[in-house]
Image (tube, helix red, strand yellow):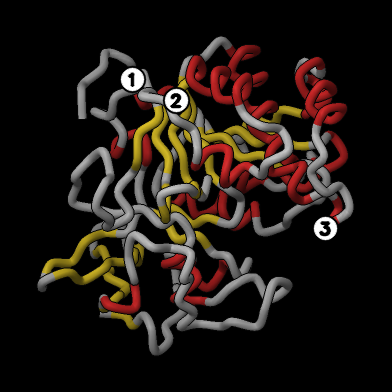
Amino acid sequence: MSSSSSSSSSIPIVLVCTGNYQEYIETCVKQLLLFENKNIVLILDAAFSHHITGHKRFKGITIVTTESLSQKRIKEFNQSTHLDSGFRGGFWRHCSSRFIYILEYMIQANIQNCFHLENDNMVYANLAKLFRDYDKGVSWICKDNPTRCIPSIMFLNRSQLADYLEKRNNNDNDMYTWGSCDNKNVKLLPICAEGADEKTDYVFDAAAIGQYLFGADPRNNFAGPGMVNTDCTFVRYDKYKLEWRFNEKTKLWYPVLIDKGKAIPIINLHMHCKNLRLAYSKEPASNSFISKK
């Protein structure tokens, strides 16, 4: 990791919810707050903002409506893309268009970096502290095979994001446009796989850990806990023991992966099953694939 004079403490954590309201975003935010994450920004369609602004527990969360952002790029994208607009209310279009909204927010707020989480992620760390010494002149992503990125958790650089949006194929989904992004300013976060651009004492979850522990989205298939995502070719998580560990100081649970007797913290779980409460740090669920230590 190369140091930077830029302070991570001021870098926002950005979530995007457009087209269809995903109520589990509220659990994602609650989890972020448990670990004292600050500067959380929700980019929402104006019709959804009341879900957040009406709750005292989300006081201090910044709401940015999609309607308040520049519409030029989003109109150009909608006119040019052939991504399916019917599946789940335009799921694939919304997945790809969110990065336009993130860029427009970064331009409007005059910031150079942000974190981005997909709404079905649970985070077990303070991201500002975790990324304090990361190179902030690049974007950091999770790839689970040579051609696919799962944008579950990302650190985005504004200049690189603009370059990605300019060059991507608007007819390919976001997993493959990021996965095929051939740019020296895109680096890989460690998912316990060879080829990551940083060796650390922790790992990130692209998707396969959360799927193995708690199953896949029931709308996709009926694979429950114990599912092995065969598209994740870099690592097989069923080869490891996974546990919940308890922090006596914070009184919070967090997941670890046991590798050669060493407990490696897992920074996020991608809860593909959409039941984020199963992984809430106040009282997470146990099953035969993850137990409490």
Other residues around mark 2 within 10 Å, as few (<14) / some (14–19) / many (≥20): some
Q: Quadrant location of the C terminus?
A: bottom left
Residue 7's label in the rendered image is 1
Amino acid type, label 2: Ile
**Residue at the (39%, 35%) spot, across then down:** 140
Mark sitting earlier along the chain (3/2): 2
> Residue 184: which quarter of the image?
top left
Vertical placement of 204 versus 49: above or below?
below
What is the residue that sits farthest to the bottom in this orientation? 288
C-alpha gap between disc 3 and disc 1: 39 Å
**Residue at the (36%, 26%) spot, across then down:** 8
Q: Can residue 132 be seen in this view?
A: yes
Circle 2 sits on which residue?
Answer: 11
> Residue 97: which quarter of the image?
top right
Task: Find residue 209 and report its horizontal and vertical position in percent.
Answer: 42, 67
Tag 1–tag 2 contact (CB < 8 Å): yes
Vertical placement of 98 versus 293: above or below?
above
Vertical placement of 54 versus 140: above or below?
below
Query: Looking at the image, is mark 3 or mark 1 nearer the viewer?
Result: 3
Circle 3 sits on which residue?
Answer: 88
